[in-house]
Amino acid sequence: MGTALAVHAARNGASAVLLATDHDEAVVERWRRGLPHPSLDLPFHQHVRCVPDGEWADVLPHAGVVIVAVSSAGLPRVLAQAARIGAPEAIWVLATKGWSPGTLQTPSQVAAAVLGDAPVVSLAGPALAAEVLAGSPTGLLCASHDRHARRCAADILASPTTAVFTSSDVAGAETAAAFKNVVAVAVGLAEGLSDRLGESGLVATFANARAAVFARGMMDMLALVEAQGGRAATVLGLAGAGDLYVTCGHGRNGRFGRLLGSGATVEGAVRSIGSTVEGVANTAPALLLAERARLDLPSARVVELALNEDLTGERVSDRLRDLFLT
């Protein structure tokens, strides 16, 4: 996503530089050789320079806007590293989605702890990296309590093919963005289990079940967002329904659920995806937040069971009924 957003900003006329972390050696090497991105299989923009982590000091002190697109687990470390050398007046845009392990902090809360009063914008919405990189039509949401910061971020990202909306509902945008990954795993599970039953000759797409899980997940998302102080309108918009839709059909978390439901182990499914599956890490935090708010989140309980129980053999039909149809 970092690469996609850097290329997108460059196409919009910004002087964009892609900062690689210490986990991105392959990205830097491919850029140096003029080859496509190793995960996206699409070319880098000719005006985007890729800088390894040891050379951030050549770029960050001059940056007016810093977009951070790393996993929730890596966010505190990367922010701390960047903040030591970044410009004090910079606006920070967070494309990270999910709760920080252990603390249950959202990305903006992590940023506040590291950056103090620096303006922070949370980026949300249905934006697959490959499609952003390719310039496909996309809708995004910039959420921030700072009106100038969210407007500035929107101006950088808006283009003839990208509609960018702004909101002050940071809690709603971040909670929906995190929980949608959990729901996408649940929807994927229903599809994966249908594939397994289909192998035995049973005609079953489980479209009804998948739709029911999607709807239950939306209800759970709404309850959790409101418990965190967010607004229902955010759940029905790009950060909630929009992002959930694309993640179920084309995102890593939906694919992970399908693999798990069709018989893969958790470890095997993660290896097959080949990158971070936020829904795995965010299921337990979602349930902890629900417990604090005295909520029941059936869609998250579905995923918790699947992550911790065997779904193979003759138990598949019974488990399918227990997980999705009760």
Image: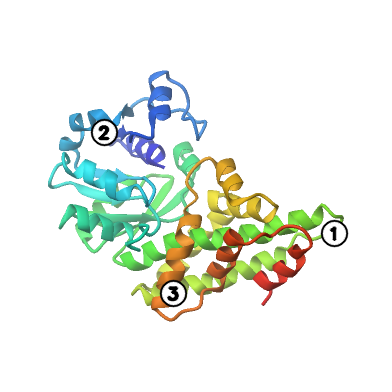
Residue furthest bottom as drawn: 294
Which mark is nearer the camera, 2 or 3?
3
Instruction: Choose the circle earlier in sequence order: 1 or 3.
Output: 1
Q: Tell me residue 137's x, y (percent).
A: 48, 47
Q: Name the residue under label 3.
A: 290
Mark 1 or mark 3, whichever is nearer to me: 3
Q: Considering only vertical position in the picture, is 59 above or below 140?
A: above
Please, what secondary structure does the residue beneath circle 3 have?
A: helix
Check disc 2 and report its element: helix, strand or loop: loop
Left or right, 326 with reference to 56: right
Quadrant of res 87: top left
**Quadrant including the N terminus:** top left
Instruction: Tell me the SS state at disc 1.
Output: loop
Q: How many marks?
A: 3
Judged left or right of residue 265, residue 219 is: left
Q: How far apart are marks 1 and 3 (CA)?
A: 37 Å
Q: Which label is found at residue 202?
A: 1
Which residue is pictured at 74% across the width and 58% down the height?
194
Residue at image location 64% in from the left, 53% down from the top: 260
Label 1 CA crowd tier, 10 Å (few <14, some 14–19, many 20+): few
- Tell me what residue is drawn at x 76 percent, y 66 percent: 317
* Mark 3: amino acid: Ala
Earlier residue among tags 2 and 3? 2
Cα gap from disc 2 to disc 3, whole angstroms: 43 Å
Q: Which residue lies furthest to the left in this view?
A: 88
Residue 171 x/y as whole percent: 33, 67
The quadrant the C terminus occupies is bottom right
Residue 15, disc = 2
Q: CB atoms at circles 1 and 2 under 8 Å apart? A: no
**Residue 31 in which image quadrant:** top left
Instruction: Name the spot of residue 93 as percent of width and height, x first.
Output: 29, 50
